[in-house]
Amino acid sequence: MDRLKFIVKRLAFMVVMLLGVATIVFFLTKLVPGDPVTANLSQRALNDPEIVEAYKIKYGLDKPVFMQYLLYIRNLLRLDLGTSIRTNKTIMWELGRCFPATAELAIFSIILAAVFGIFFGIISAMKRNSIIDQLVRAISVCGVSIPGFWFALLVLFFFYYKLQIMPGPGRLSTAFSSPEAVTGFFTIDALIEGDIPKFLDALKHLILPGFVLAAFTMGLITRTARSNLLDVLSTDYIRTAKAKGTPGRRMIMHHALGNALIPVLTVIGLGFGNLLGGMVLIETIFNWPGVGQFAYNSVKALDYPGVIGVSLLIALNYMIINTVVDILYGLIDPRVRTK
Amino acid sequence: MKKLLALLIAMCMVASLAACGGSGSSGGDATEAAAETEAAGGDEAEAPAEGEEAEAEAPAEGGDNTVVIAVISGFSAMDPAYVYETTPTLMVNACYETLYKFDTGVDTPQPCLVDSCEFSEDGKDVTMKLKPEVKFASGNDMTSADVAFSLMRLKNIKGNPSFLMDNVESVEVVDDDTFIIHQTTADSSLLAKLTYGSCSIVDSAIVKENGGTDAEDASTADTARDYLDTTSAGSGMYIMTSYVPDEEMILEKNYNYWGEQTNVDKYIIRFEGDANTQMMGLKAGDVDIALNLNDDTMDELEGAENVTTENTPTKTISFIMMNEDPEIGGPVSNKLVQQAIRLAVDYEGMQNVCGRGAITPKSIFQVGFLGSAGELDVATARDLDKAKALLAEAGYPDGFDIDLPVSDLDMEGIPMLDIAQKVKEDLSEIGINVNIVQQNWSGGYGDAYRAGDLGFSVMYWGIDYNDPNVQLAFLPGESVGLRCRWQAEGYEPVIEKMNEIIQETDDTARGEKLLEIQDMIADDCPWIVVAQASSHIGYSNRLEGVAFTDVYRVDIRTINVK
């Protein structure tokens, strides 16, 4: 019951936060020194007042800014995010098109980051100060420090261009058509179609961008998992378990890991939010038709509805992820639940 | 919980390993998949029934005849009445036809849908007859009513390219095959304008069914854009069967095509903004034609066995602009300073900055256009001593400091910033200290540039339509001329000559007048054209008939698989 109350409270808070984000982003976009009319109409079109007027009316730019804001909020409450000035499609349609691509890549990346990050963290903690530990720590520092765009170009150059063992940019090879959209995740939709070659192709296309995106979060997870595990390993109950002769692997997996994982979960949650929000460069380099690429193109064209739509989506993601992480805390650690 | 976590981890690792293990050759899998479908599907794709769209499923039967083109995105519309940017003309040319077209390597518009064309004595009215055999992809016959609808819809929709119809008063339908274009004044560039993708003739029955109108209130009443942005309604060689913005577009063969077809069954147009990505795709065989390469990527492709590269001059120019208004331009509004800067630019070095194939025209009229004054002799065009003397004469013997705002745009892959840096380097040799100020196009630069509020800058210009008259916009009092506040006052003879050029329907006479007008503004022009850019394209050797054209980028109608 308490948990239900907690979730309802968080959901209500989320609505208020989203309205706040919408307000801030709306007025920020209006502060940008540029005019969407001049950004999207040609000089010759701008010379014709009728064309300019028709354009302004079409996108509601003929009204005072505050009126535009009220209309935007009214439409937002009706889940209408407006129409893209750049593509002439509704923002909901655009986000619906882009989000599955981003989500599929982000989920793949976070799984890679979590699995390998925790694995490396455990190895590193178990072999503390050994060569393996030093190696893992060096890798994790590299993962955290390498600029994503540079790493992306590098892996593309080597694995796709030079070695030709990985597919190039995009979500699917040209020999395959996009699977019929059920979830929007090409891997899952290909499986639903029963097309295994297409599934494998989609999965292969996830590897390079997924690996690049995972590098940063994986580094963080490795470091957090290692340091937390070392902390837990120095506690009294672990010492007692050791004294009772519990084998090392069993001690780690059954006694230490659960407690060490709680902060790691926070890192995974935040990392996932970062992945969803920080894909602009990676999606552009890998020609991944996701939210990041849409955001980049919207900013370039001063497409206000597009920019606000993406901002809201990213904010919503963060809020949902944080809520899920809070709930998961309780599942992993009963002490958190009782608090 | 722990078991669940362990299971999840195990599944992820298995999935990752499975994917890695099978990644020996992505191309191999793709080919295998294509081969499987080929085996199942037979040799020849069957023509769909009349009006039926070809299926978008890939790989197509005869998958070898699918061609993949990589091109930058950055456009907003596929509805011909809204098409204005460069990239969509590639696709529009494949799906639609215009009354006239530019054939590759031919400088004058050639009849496409038109059988005959006759100008009235005053040049204002043009009577044209359609070819009788033309059919739309839907199977409908093309008639004069479709022509009138398409051109008047373009005019009344008041979109970016509607200016092409500014001089057209009406289109009169005489009979099914004959129509008359009534113009306000004679326009020597009419036929060139009619080649532009926006003047495509659309299937009016289908467009009307989907909310299209050519009425005067089309700017608010027409709702066909949603439909035409995702499918095509033309008579071209291909049909657009799928378009996902910023991702890809599929063009499939129009089996109702009235003319001779090529052997390419299907085009996949991939929107890839990065030259490196395009180059890697081309070399790896994933891409057949890469349209936005640059010097570095061309170097990388040199010697590649399966690829041909071409550098072809475009009609896109980059220029230095100097504001004529002393309050905005400061010292560069002085004619002597403008001449000094003109003499101080290292045009040869500028060509190197702009990449192989770049040339320098003598004036704002590009090399390749009717009436062009030809190429500048870059070896002798620079004279630093004379430039310094002119600066001293203008009252700046020690030079001066000046800001140079520059946008984040690029011209055929050459960042404006690179050109600005070269300008800075060149002008430092005559004592002008240039301070480069970087600005975003959409973050204020574009507004200031178009409003004529920039004092000193570098920018580029791509042609709106393939005719020298398009360059008349640079003259005093005209839309581009006003960007550096070059007013018409005091230039009455130039304006008179310009009007003569517009109305001169004899090309020989027009060419002479174009040369005269260039002489008239040679010393006064606040523009310095620093280079005419080159296009860098690469294509697979399995193709033939690939060539760059200014109008369509590449003309899909001429490409065949060997």
Image (cartoon, rainbow, N blue to C red):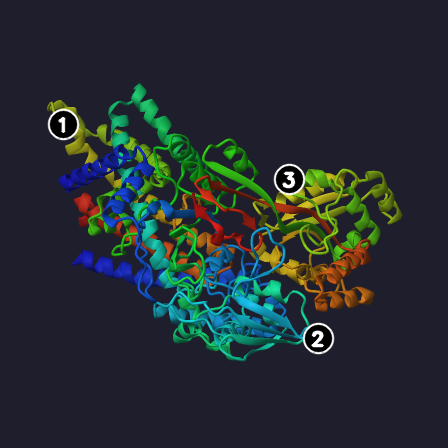
The verdict on a common chain for dots 2 and 1 is no
> Which label's residue is closer to the chain start, 2 or 3?
2
Return the x and y of residue B269 as percentages of the image width and height. 42, 51
The local crowd at label 2, few if under 14, some if 14 to 19, many if 20 or more residues have their Cα within 10 Å, is: few
**Label at residue B353:** 3
- Does residue B27 appear in the picture of this structure? yes
Relative side of A195 to B205, left or right: left
Q: Which residue, as the protein is rendered here, is positioned at the far top? A: A131
Q: Which residue is the site of mark 2?
A: B122
User: Could you tell me if residue A339 is visible in this image?
Assistant: no
Residue A237 vs residue A113, the one in the foreground: A113
Q: Residues within 10 Å of mark 3 (few under 14, many from 20)?
A: some
Query: Dot 1: what SS?
Result: helix
Task: Classify the position of the N terminus of chain A by image quarter.
Answer: bottom left
Residue type at mark 2: give it: Asp
Identify the residue position indicated by label 1 in the image: A241
Residue A91 in picture, x, y percent from top left: 39, 63
